[in-house]
Image: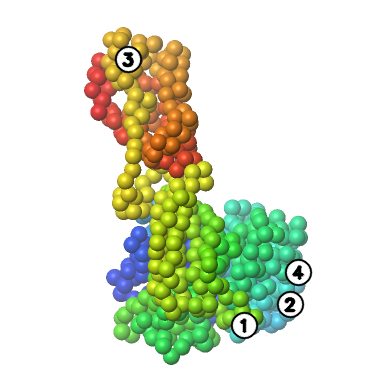
């Protein structure tokens, strides 16, 4: 969602407990677990007024640029920092996209931030505007807010009544290739640049202009788009097909006031808005989008504040006069994606048949989803080895269906106007990418299924009865004493002996046989000396390399490992055979 000034102003009017609830609802572990966000450079329509960080006419050297970002430190920056802290406590991070709506008025040919002439920028302002954007990024980073990516201009084809700056594809390509790209690469090489940032109906034309221009293409990481021209999924697919290296990002969606029906209320919103969001997210993701960003995170009871009265709906609305918060259906529908499609998940080909799909002669209004769209679904392989399948029904009737993966299948049913998420472990060996050594965020699902495991004792942690040839038959009770018998942990004889054992004890062929017999897990006892090795402990170093190799082999086969810290400091000393 977007950290607009409007959202921050409403957030500031909430009670402390309500502020905490909003942060938890969006970014917390019990909420929607957002990891993508957006922020505007200078003001946008969802600001109380026009503002910029250098209003001195003709200051092309930016001597008067406000590096302290005084305006944003009162509202937007504290709001973002609360989200960052919530994510930091979970070991997660926010990927923040920054977009300008308009340069300062003195850089524009019309002399004001609202509206735009063509061309928008004064000829002598191109270099200064690029330097301004880079300066803003640097200032935000100094505030402790990392910027993941930028777009050069929000909605470059929209001569809006609010902040705007018109670009043709050719003008945008020249600005990126000659000015913004080189300056960003010099100052912030790791920050991505997404071009366009407007509606899907012209997406391909802008992609073609950018990525077929060598000078601009070297700076463009991808292309961003909005939903206001309708579904446009084919346009995304075409860009993905012809420019496969370009990242695709759905960067804005919301319902403007003209889309509100008489059924919509502040307290409950409108159910079809949630359906429209899910329909667009599914279509965008299948077509190749790497993410999906909602517009305002939070608005007041009027759908603002907005300085040109371009009010909109939001996933969470606040009646600031009554001190009430309301979640609209969009919040819950988005949650099916943001909660269950973990960062790093991979799109899987999902066939849905037989089912109708919309093929009308004309584009419908954005965010439209009806029974004509049939049963809609997408699936992703998550990093933890689970498959998440999301199913949407915008129709008036219940749909019975069968969900099949590999050799497994299950009958299911989805009511009218509903969304469902199914979470299950993959059986597609060789294409799944589970992390067999990381605890799953879907443990409650995992525990409900039986598993079969085998112990790999005597491999990375040695006991006499498990390696009788080298230990018990020679009166050596433990790994510590074995190492000493071969000259100590640095002696080549000890290293050769132990590494040969690690190398041959378990092989990929062994794992194939275990998998074919139906084993899903292996247990690996380890000692404290496996990592953070200290030669004074008396053990041969390097076992962790073989552990990581095993985990990779397991991952390829869709299997998991249980690591058992079987020996704490003091558990093995000379002639101390007790390890567990």
Between disc 3 and disc 1, whose residue precedes?
Answer: 1
Q: Nearer the viewer, residue 521 or 215?
A: 521
- Say which element carries label 3: loop
Q: What residue sits right under mark 4 in the picture?
A: 170
Q: Position of residue 171 (x, y in %)?
A: 74, 70
Q: What residue sits right under mark 2 in the picture?
A: 119
- Say which element carries label 1: loop
Q: Position of residue 247 (x, y in %)?
A: 61, 59
Q: Is residue 442 left or right of residue 230?
A: left
- To which quarter of the image does residue 175 belong? bottom right
CA separation, marks 4 and 3?
Answer: 76 Å
Residue 211 - label: none
Q: Nearer the viewer, mark 4 or mark 3?
A: 3
Q: Nearer the viewer, mark 2 or mark 4?
A: 4
Q: What residue sits right under mark 1 in the picture?
A: 160
CA separation, marks 1 and 4?
Answer: 20 Å
Residue 529 visible: no
Q: Nearer the viewer, mark 2 or mark 1?
A: 1
């Amino acid at each position: 969602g977007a950290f607009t000034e409007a959202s921050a102003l409403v957030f500031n009017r909430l009670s402390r407990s309500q502020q905490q609830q909003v942060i938890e609802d969006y970014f917390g572990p019990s909420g929607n677990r957002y990891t993508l966000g957006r922020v505007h450079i200078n003001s946008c329509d969802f600001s109380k007024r026009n503002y910029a960080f250098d209003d001195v006419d003709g200051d092309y050297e930016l001597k008067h640029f406000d590096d302290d970002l005084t305006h944003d430190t009162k509202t937007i920056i504290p709001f973002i920092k609360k989200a960052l802290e919530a994510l930091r406590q979970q070991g997660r991070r926010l990927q923040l996209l920054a977009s300008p709506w308009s340069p300062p008025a003195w850089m524009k040919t019309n002399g004001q931030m609202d509206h735009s002439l063509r061309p928008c920028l004064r000829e002598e302002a191109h270099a200064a505007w690029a330097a301004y954007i880079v300066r803003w990024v640097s200032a935000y980073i100094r505030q402790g807010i990392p910027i993941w990516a930028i777009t050069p201009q929000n909605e470059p084809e929209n001569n809006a009544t609010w902040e705007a700056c018109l670009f043709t594809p050719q003008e945008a390509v020249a600005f990126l290739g000659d000015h913004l790209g080189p300056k960003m690469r010099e100052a912030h090489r790791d920050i991505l640049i997404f071009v366009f940032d407007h509606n899907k109906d012209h997406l391909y034309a802008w992609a073609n202009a950018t990525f077929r221009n060598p000078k601009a293409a070297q700076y463009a990481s991808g292309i961003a788009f909005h939903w206001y021209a309708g579904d446009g999924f084919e346009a995304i697919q075409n860009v993905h097909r012809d420019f496969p290296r370009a990242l695709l990002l759905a960067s804005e969606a919301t319902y403007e006031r003209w889309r509100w029906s008489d059924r919509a209320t502040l307290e409950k919103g409108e159910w079809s808005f949630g359906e429209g969001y899910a329909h667009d997210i599914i279509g965008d993701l299948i077509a190749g989008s790497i993410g999906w960003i909602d517009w305002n995170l939070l608005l007041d009871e009027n759908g603002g504040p907005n300085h040109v009265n371009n009010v909109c709906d939001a996933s969470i609305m606040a009646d600031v006069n009554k001190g009430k918060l309301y979640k609209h259906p969009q919040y819950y529908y988005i949650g099916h994606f943001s909660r269950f499609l973990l960062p790093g998940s991979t799109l899987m080909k999902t066939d849905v048949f037989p089912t109708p799909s919309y093929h009308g002669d004309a584009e419908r209004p954005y965010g439209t989803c009806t029974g004509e769209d049939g049963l809609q679904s997408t699936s992703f392989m998550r990093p933890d080895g689970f498959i998440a399948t999301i199913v949407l029904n915008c129709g008036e009737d219940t749909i019975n269906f069968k969900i099949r993966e590999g050799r497994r299948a299950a009958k299911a049913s989805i009511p009218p106007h509903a969304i469902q998420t199914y979470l299950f472990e993959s059986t597609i060996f060789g294409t799944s990418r589970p992390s067999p050594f990381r605890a799953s965020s879907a443990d409650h699902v995992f525990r409900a299924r039986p598993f079969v495991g085998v112990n790999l004792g005597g491999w990375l942690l040695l006991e006499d009865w498990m390696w009788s040839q080298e230990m018990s038959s020679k009166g050596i009770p433990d790994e510590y004493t074995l190492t000493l018998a071969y000259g100590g942990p640095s002696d080549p004889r000890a290293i050769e002996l132990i590494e040969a054992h690690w190398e041959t004890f378990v092989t990929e062929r062994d794992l194939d046989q275990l998998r074919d017999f139906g084993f899903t897990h292996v247990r690996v006892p380890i000692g404290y000396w496996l990592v953070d090795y200290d030669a004074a402990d008396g053990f041969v170093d390097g076992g962790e390399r073989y552990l990581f190799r095993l985990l990779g082999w397991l991952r390829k086969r869709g299997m998991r490992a249980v690591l058992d810290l079987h020996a704490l400091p003091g558990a093995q000393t000379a002639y101390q055979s007790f390890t567990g």
